[in-house]
Image (cartoon, helix red, strand yellow):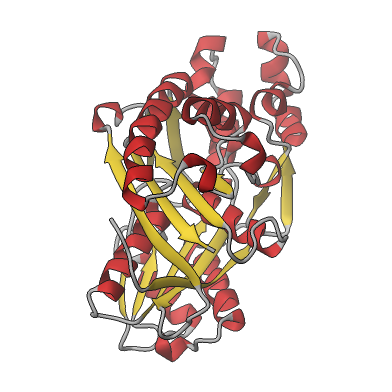
Amino acid sequence: MKFEHTVIESIAVALPDDVLTSAQIEQRLAPLYERLKLPEGRLELMTGIKERRVWPTGTRPSDASAAAGRKVLAQSRLAAEHVELFIHAAVSRDMLEPATASFAHHKIGLPRTAQIYDVSNACLGFLNALTIAASMIESGQIKCALVCSGENGGPLVENTLNTLLEKPLSRQDIKPYFANLTIGSGAVAAVICHDSLAPDGHRLVGGMARAATEHSALCQGDTHGADSLAMQTDSEALLVAGVALAQETWTDFVKEVGWSRDEFTRFICHQVGSTHRRKLYEALELDLAKDFSTFETLGNTGSVALPATLATAADTGAIKHGDRVGLLGIGSGLNCLMLAVDW
């Protein structure tokens, strides 16, 4: 995919105030650790995640999505009435029907003329939504879109803790639950528009998508209400398959956008943890010094993780005007989407 006239006009992150550390999680799991003789500090040591954020009880995904949407519009030069397309692109949803976008649309105060819908594709949802909006902009259907994701991982972490403490699980039994303890909460939003509305915007150059759906069983989650989230992951197999798919995607990605490996100034990958990052960069032969990460303090925030890290890098000056940025997205399913942005 290639884009000629689409820019990211602005991007913003909204985070919960409450922090849950890996040490606090292990304190809750002390009876399990003692029974299975697990070493203290295991969670942070294996993932590099020191803490994650948690929304207050009762927070809906639409509340989080709307918080980010209001924040990005407050800093944008474009007003709410410019928005012709609104997408909620998170894993988390208020309910099955109606679309969570309908609740967030109302909470943000977007116009009745805007098309609205949800886009869901695990941790790739936000990047997928960017390409959908960009395609509509390029085709002349719209000139401005707002993409939001609001992830609430708190109920999943809490449900996992209860399961680990209540069931007589062995060391082998707890492995599928381990990834759940890396999950954090947060929200992100971006205003995407035709470059005629923001000539100095961050240009979306193009990208490449690949799927390896034979691995769709490696990470599966379900819900029976906001307070009963469950997920099980074969983390080791998912890592191997994910890196292999990323290699395949990367080869075609650089050909599509016409940038060599060395021409990229900065890379933002999906924020899983330190092992995933190291394996990915080694496999793609990328310079780890060009990485920017947030998993250490935010954990894995699903669809929010990569774009929130991009926004944080820009806010802190780690990405500057003129930088060439590679967004290396991957999500369970198994799917990979890489995008190039001329910042």
Picture layout, residue 187 above or below residue 33: below
Residue found 60% across the figure and 61% down from its top: 311
Residue 168: x and y, percent? 55, 14
Residue found 41% across the figure and 52% down from its top: 339
Residue placed most toward the observer, 164 or 118: 118
Residue found 24% across the figure and 80% down from its top: 140
Picture layout, residue 85 above or below residue 174: below
Locate the C terminus and report the quarter of the image it occupies.
Answer: bottom right
Residue 213: x and y, percent? 25, 33
Picture layout, residue 230 above or below residue 263: above
Residue placed most toward the observer, 212 or 231: 212
Residue placed most toward the observer, 172 or 310: 310
Picture layout, residue 207 above or below residue 234: below
Q: How many marks?
A: 0
Relative horizontal placement of residue 99, taking residue 312 as reference (left or right): left
Can residue 53 be seen in this snapshot? yes
Residue 284: x and y, percent? 47, 30
Residue found 52% across the figure and 29% down from its top: 285
Relative horizontal placement of residue 187, taking residue 50 as reference (left or right): left
Relative horizontal placement of residue 94, taking residue 112 as reference (left or right): right
Can residue 91 be seen in this snapshot? no
Residue 24, quarter of picture: top right
Locate the N terminus and report the quarter of the image it occupies.
Answer: bottom left
Residue placed most toward the observer, 120 or 248: 248
